[in-house]
């Protein structure tokens, strides 16, 4: 059973998937930082200094806090600002993945359109061709 598991884990697809998941997680962290630290502050500055991360609707009358972290401690809240930020995150990730896949498809098409080189003749064929040419003389 251990041998079968090792064979399964070492198959190319499993290793490729693991690498993809790790790179995807790292890429997700970069995009989260890009959205949270660069894009959302710019959008906030353009809209008069608004901070989307603190946009929420209290679902309980007991919630009197003015920021999301304190409001969550007091009761249920509908944090639509966080949802907006995550939606922008998703759109950016989807767009970047679209660009990457588009570039890969373009490269693949270029490789497919290249004319294939004729195969090199074997040593025997080269020798027989030389003998034929010598016999013609």
Image (cartoon, rainbow, N blue to C red):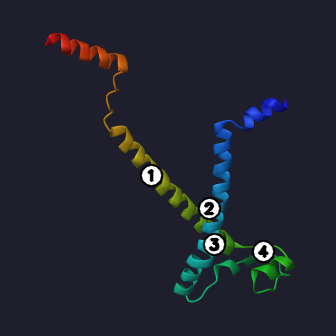
Q: Where is residue 14 in the image (x, y as percent from the top left)?
A: 68, 40
Residue beneath label 4, please?
A: 77
> Upstream in the sequence, badge 2 or badge 3?
2
Q: Residues within 10 Å of mark 3 (few under 14, many from 20)?
A: some
Labels 2 and 3 touching (C-beta < 8 A): no
Residue beneath label 1, please?
A: 102
> Upstream in the sequence, badge 2 or badge 1?
2
Residue beneath label 3, please?
A: 33
Residue 123: name its quadrant.
Answer: top left
Q: How crowded is mark 2: few (under 14 residues within 10 Å), some or many (20 or more)?
A: few
> In the image, 129: left or right of 9?
left
Front: mark 3 or 4: 3
Q: Is mark 4 on a helix, strand or loop?
A: strand
> Upstream in the sequence, badge 1 or badge 4?
4
Labels 3 and 4 touching (C-beta < 8 A): no
Whether residue 36 is situated above or below residue 123 in the rendered picture:
below
- Residue at 68% from the left image edge and 78% from the top image edge: 53
Labels 1 and 4 touching (C-beta < 8 A): no
Residue beneath label 2, please?
A: 27
């Amino acid at each position: 059973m251990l041998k079968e598991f090792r064979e399964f884990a070492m198959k190319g697809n499993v290793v490729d998937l693991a690498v993809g998941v790790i790179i995807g997680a790292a890429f997700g962290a970069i995009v989260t930082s890009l959205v949270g630290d660069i894009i959302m502050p710019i959008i906030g500055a353009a809209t008069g200094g608004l901070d989307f991360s603190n946009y929420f609707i209290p679902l309980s009358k007991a919630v009197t806090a003015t920021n999301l972290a304190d409001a969550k401690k007091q009761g249920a809240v509908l944090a639509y600002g966080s949802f907006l930020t995550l939606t922008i995150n998703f759109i950016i990730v989807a767009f970047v993945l679209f660009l990457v896949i588009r570039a890969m498809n373009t490269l693949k098409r270029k490789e497919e359109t290249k004319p294939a080189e004729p195969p090199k003749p074997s040593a025997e064929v080269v020798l027989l061709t030389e003998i034929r040419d010598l016999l013609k003389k």
